[in-house]
Image (cartoon, grey):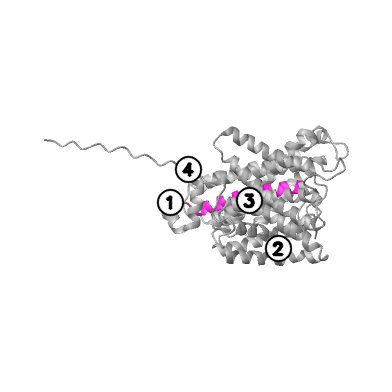
Amino acid sequence: MELGFLLASIVKIAAILAYLYGLLWVLGHKKLWVKVVGVAAAFILVQLALTITIGGEEGETLLNNFDQGLIFQAASMTMVALGLNLIYGFNGQFSLGQWGFYGIGAYTAADITFRWINGDSRGLIVAGVGSILGILMILGIQKLLNRYKGVPVLSAFTLYLIGSVVVGAIAVFIGNLINPALTPLLGTLSEPGPLAQGAWLQVVYFLAVIIAGIFAGEVSFLFGLPVLSLGSDYFGIATLGFTIIINTLMVNSDTILPFPEMKGGRGMIGIPKMTTWFWAFFFMLLVIIIMRNVIHSSTGRTILAVREDETASKAMGIDVANTKLLTFVIGSFFAGIGGGVYAHYIGFLSPGTFDFITGFNPLIIVVFGGLGSMTGTITASFTWIFFLEGLLRVLLGQMGTDAPTWRFVLYPIVLLLLMLIKPSGLLGNVEWGFLKAPFIKPREKPASTPEVVKG
């Protein structure tokens, strides 16, 4: 390997760490104008690196195509890993199902936009209406169950499952009803209509990613309701089984499931590549802000309390089961958004990308960065992608065609060494800038009034 490439890779990793520190610093600044200018500058800095060419019009950009792929992959991985850190690091629930929800989000968002540009609005309508009705159904059944005490978990799960089937049927009916009216406005792939191009298409992309996150969260709710009653170890095994089931459904999506456009094990092609740095930056920032505000809220304190001691949490009146379920749903929502962003950057989805072996990547990143550290997860996501998937992969690739697979041997070795040297992860509980806990000024005690001595 050339020495120049090695030095350039080290400089890029150092620059990324400085970039992340600066971004979190400006987000945590007290003055609003500093936040706005800082975030805009952080976006523009990378955007310029993606567009400015070196050596004329035919030269490469400052961040070449390989680096661009790593940037977008790291942004998606940050969202997935933050969701897992919320579930495992902050709530203490060992989960191996995060990659499955990542895949659900990717395929859901991809199917919506794929159908839309090919003149079929049912993907957006069915998924959108189904997601909204699904939320209303869950809230309605929860309100009903709150009137009765001691309802078995499986009985509640049955009600939610029946409600989901009804909601799905209604959404499909509405989709089939509205689709003919929108078809002339969508056109075809070769001759797109007014709704399948320009700003309208960007709106559809935004909705597709959000709906993908909501759908992943709703699936996690149905799955987590009966499974979260298990202990942490058994819950981990159950989530691993969930990931394998989702991967199997992806492989057979064109036979078992009514989605021939996904092409099963052959992989889904023709996904519009609509993820730009603006959207990747926007959604990553959105996930970071939501998670930070959740952690530093009263809900976040209950999440941490459940991790520390479930028995003591119950004694203090915390609903442990609902807290676990809420955390699981939010973490899965983040994974679904990350999947939607990734699908529209890569433009191709293969079930092999979402198998259970690669599903360990977010877990390694979370442990590597530090359980319960948002800063550690963000920095570890970018460092992981650029060092192990970027530099190390290129280095091993020059040693032979089969050499890159050795990185799967080096990953656990690096992780084991880290656990021996620093069990708390690279950053432990350290947080940077915006992610630090807000300072709460202690209450001032009222001045004590002197006692009047009666003579």
Identify the disc placed on residue 317: 1
Residue 62 highlighted magenta (yes or no): no
What is the span of residues highlighted in magenta in the rendered image? 319-344
Say what amino acid the circle numbered 4 marks.
Phe
- Name the residue beneath numbered marker 3: 378
Label tally: 4
Question: What's the CA distance linking mark 4 and mark 2?
Answer: 41 Å
- Name the residue beneath numbered marker 4: 439
* Callout 3 crowding tier (Cα within 10 Å): few <14, some 14–19, many ≥20: many
Identify the disc placed on residue 357: 2
Question: What's the CA distance linking mark 3 and mark 4?
Answer: 22 Å
User: In the rendered image, is residue 214 in sight?
Assistant: no
Residue 343 highlighted magenta (yes or no): yes
* Callout 2 crowding tier (Cα within 10 Å): few <14, some 14–19, many ≥20: few
**Between disc 4 and disc 1, whose residue precedes?**
1
**Between disc 1 and disc 3, whose residue precedes?**
1
Which residue is pictured at 74% across the width and 51% down the height? 70
Give the left or right position of residue 438, taking residue 158 as reference.
left
170 relative to 406, above or below: above
**Between disc 2 and disc 1, whose residue precedes?**
1
Secondary element at image label 2? loop
